Amino acid sequence: MQEHAPPLTFPALVTALRAAGCVFAEDEAELLLASAADPAGLAAMLERRAAGLPLEHVVGWAEFCGLRIEVDPGVFVPRRRTEFLVRQAVALASGRAVVVDLCCGTGALGRALASSLPEAELHAADVEPAAVRCARRNVGGRGTVYEGDLFTPLPRSLRGRVDVLLANVPYVPTEDVELLPAEARIHEPRVALDGGGDGLDVLRRVVAEADDWLAPGGSLLVETSERQAARARETVGSGGLTARVVVSEELYATVVIGTRPR
């Protein structure tokens, strides 16, 4: 007669997660316990997490701006620091704003902004098919998600009408990608991480077209690193936008905002 392993207890989960190198083992153990449908499912989740999969891929969702965002395997996980970018966008937007979320990943940014501005018109796009499928579930009826490279799949009718352009572009320099934690380096798409030689290649492509898509007074918002902030600001300014840098010490977040003159 086959013997079954006893159900995993909270202390056992914490011990196993700590052994796997999880810094916040207690918090993760609570989340795994709350997410598992049964003991077998819990054991499988622990095995996947201990093998190095991002916690959000294991449980299938991430909390972002107070929302539960579905996260599929192989899709970029929304970072808590990016909530600062959303806050800046909400402060700039009007109730009926036209919003575009480029490099949308799970669609978390656009969904969060639309939740704060229920009358906003939301459009989102990503080049990764898996991300697009995930984003369509998260955005639901709040907006439309397109598959394609940057502005390419967007309706031409949006040209000159976009009030808020969120572009959470990849900004890790190519040579630094290998220095990222294994969770990101192995389990997230490289196209969502690698920003080219100096980390600003995708930003340059966005800036080259942003002025054509933004409405007068509309703003482009991008996240960057502290050490890239000055160059990112120069890049945004080179596209004819009035650029400034805002920083959150709390979230360790740096955002560049470029506004099209009225």
Image (tube, rainbow, N blue to C red):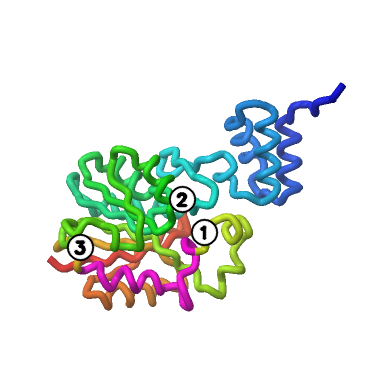
Name the N-terminal-most of marks 1 and 3: 1
Disc 2 to disc 1, C-alpha distance:
10 Å
Measured along the vertical axis of the image, is residue 234 above or below residue 152? Answer: below
Q: Which residue is mark 1?
A: 189
Foreground mark, 1 or 3, reads 1
Q: Which residue is mark 2?
A: 130
Q: Is residue 178 left or right of residue 139?
A: right
Measured as percent of width and height from the top left, residue 16 is found at: 75, 42
The answer to whether mark 1 and mark 3 are in CB contact below 8 A is no
Q: Quadrant of the N terminus?
A: top right
Q: Residue at x 38, y 54 (%)?
A: 104
- Magenta residues? 191-211
Q: Is residue 142 magenta?
A: no
The answer to whether mark 2 and mark 3 are in CB contact below 8 A is no
Out of 116 and 58, give the one closest to the viewer: 58
Q: Is residue 204 magenta?
A: yes
SS at circle 2 = helix
Q: Which residue is mark 3?
A: 214
Q: Residue at x 84, y 25 (%)?
A: 3
Name the N-terminal-most of marks 2 and 3: 2
Measured as percent of width and height from the top left, residue 72 is found at: 51, 45
Out of 5 and 255, give the one closest to the viewer: 5
SS at circle 1 = loop
- Check the image and name the residue furthest to the top: 1
Badge 2 density bin: few <14, some 14–19, many ≥20, Cα 10 Å: some
Badge 3 density bin: few <14, some 14–19, many ≥20, Cα 10 Å: many
Quadrant in the picture for residue 217: bottom left
Badge 1 density bin: few <14, some 14–19, many ≥20, Cα 10 Å: some
Out of 50 and 129, give the one closest to the viewer: 129
Quadrant in the picture for residue 245: bottom left
Going by the numbered disc 1, the residue's amino acid type is: Pro
Going by the numbered disc 3, the residue's amino acid type is: Leu
